[in-house]
Amino acid sequence: MLKVSSLLNIATKLKNVCSIVNMAGYRQYSQNREAVVFPGIQSHYTEEMVFSDIQNEEKMDTFRIMNLKGKVINKTMEPDLSNETLVKMYKHCIIHKHMDKIMHELQRQGRISFYMTSRGEEVLQTGSAAGFHPEDLLFGQYREAGVIFWRGFSVYDMISQCYSNNSDLLKGRNMPVHYGSKEHHFVPMSSCLGTQIPHAVGVAYANKIKNKNLCSGVYFGEGASSEGDAHAAFNFAAVLKCPVIFICRNNGYAISTPTKDQYSGDGLAARAKSYGISTIRVDGNDILAMYAATKQARELAVKKNKPYFIEALAYRLGDHSTSDDSTVYKNAEEQEYWLVQGDPIPRFRKYLQDKGLWDDKTEESFNKEAKKEVLTAFKKADKQLKPNPNFMFTDVYKEMPERLQNQHQDWRKHILENADKYPLANHDQF
């Protein structure tokens, strides 16, 4: 038999173990159910063999503030935005819509090589962008023109980037519609899906370490959420508690692949929750809901130093890009339904009209003004020369490596010896 002293030692050790377990956040024994004692697990033992299936669990609701007719359902949730800001947000959406239409036509005319419209996602971009602090570093995928536009990047800046002319801040070294600006705290976009997601988490971690009281924000589509980079980023952010906002644009299609062929389960929100990230699903066609959710997530991310995930539902009304024909994989009935139900701009307009901030006469007048602004910027950008070809070598490294210097010299020699074969007159300098 064990001595009393031995029993006391065992009891003390068990008490210490339970104390450590409780400090780690595990559940105590309660309601006659035995708690599982294991690192990283919060659970109770059961004698019933049940396979957990998310299909049988309660689905996540979708947050909204106004209905399809632009009526606020719960006044207590209506964000405190000034009339001036509301009108500014609407004007940005209208200008964005006109720019998309005109730039799409310019691509079809062969003036630019590529373009991507944001039809159906305009208010998602504008509303969320307004919810961030201007100094929060944002990362886009390739359909975030409205985000950088809200931050002050002009229509001319965007068209110049698509033209790759000598006013392009990226100096012709990126795909069209892949905007970026250090001044506007917006990292240049990349065509490679998902690469920006870990970068945003890394920036958030740096902000946390430096106590900057800033967060980072990253946009991506539901298709990109299947990339390995996305899942590494989710786990990185959750484990290290990084102040980052993940904004997933669930627009129904990853190019031509519908969501039913992309994932099983309750949308993308379920993925984020499984990593331990606080998550909300939002009606991406409700600009007030997008603003409110982003603003709240941003405040909490900075205050609590933890990530937040927003799944924004906004059906893609147009083609994936000018290299795509969505009529091949979308039937006419689907297109017709969403063109009525999925256009967020009329919904926002009804909201403004009910507040007495907008009317039909103002709508007609501003549409003419917006179209004129875009056409003026286009005409100016169209006349600009192409960037200096030397930018292919310079302004990449702080100090150009010797091997690159040699390549640069060989390249210049070749061009000068064959100047008649290259359109040097179209470039700013050589």
Image: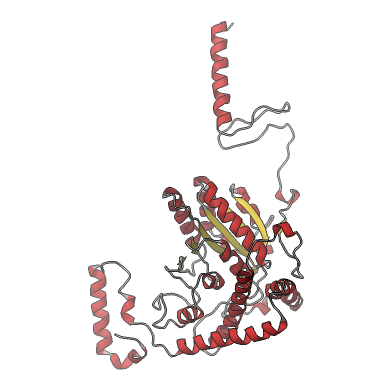
Q: Please, is residue 344 above or below residue 224 in the view? A: below
Residue 154 in view in this figure: yes
- Residue 403 left/right relative to 124: left
The quadrant holding residue 365 is bottom right
Q: Residue at x 59, y 86 (%)?
A: 369
- The quadrant of the image that shows the N terminus is top right
Residue 368: image location, x then y, percent: 62, 87
User: What is the quadrant of residue 132 in the picture?
Assistant: bottom right
Up the image or down, 152 lies above or below 370; here it is above
Q: Is residue 195 visible?
A: no
The x, y position of residue 398, in whole percent, is 29, 66
Q: Is residue 316 above or below residue 282?
A: below
- Give the camera-side residue of 342 and 183: 183
Residue 121, x across and y down, in percent: 63, 71
Q: Could you say which is closer to the camera, residue 165 or residue 93?
A: 93
At x 76%, y 74%, the residue is 337
* 94 lies above or below 208: below
83 vs 427, nearest the viewer: 83
Quarter-wise, where is residue 422 in the image? bottom left
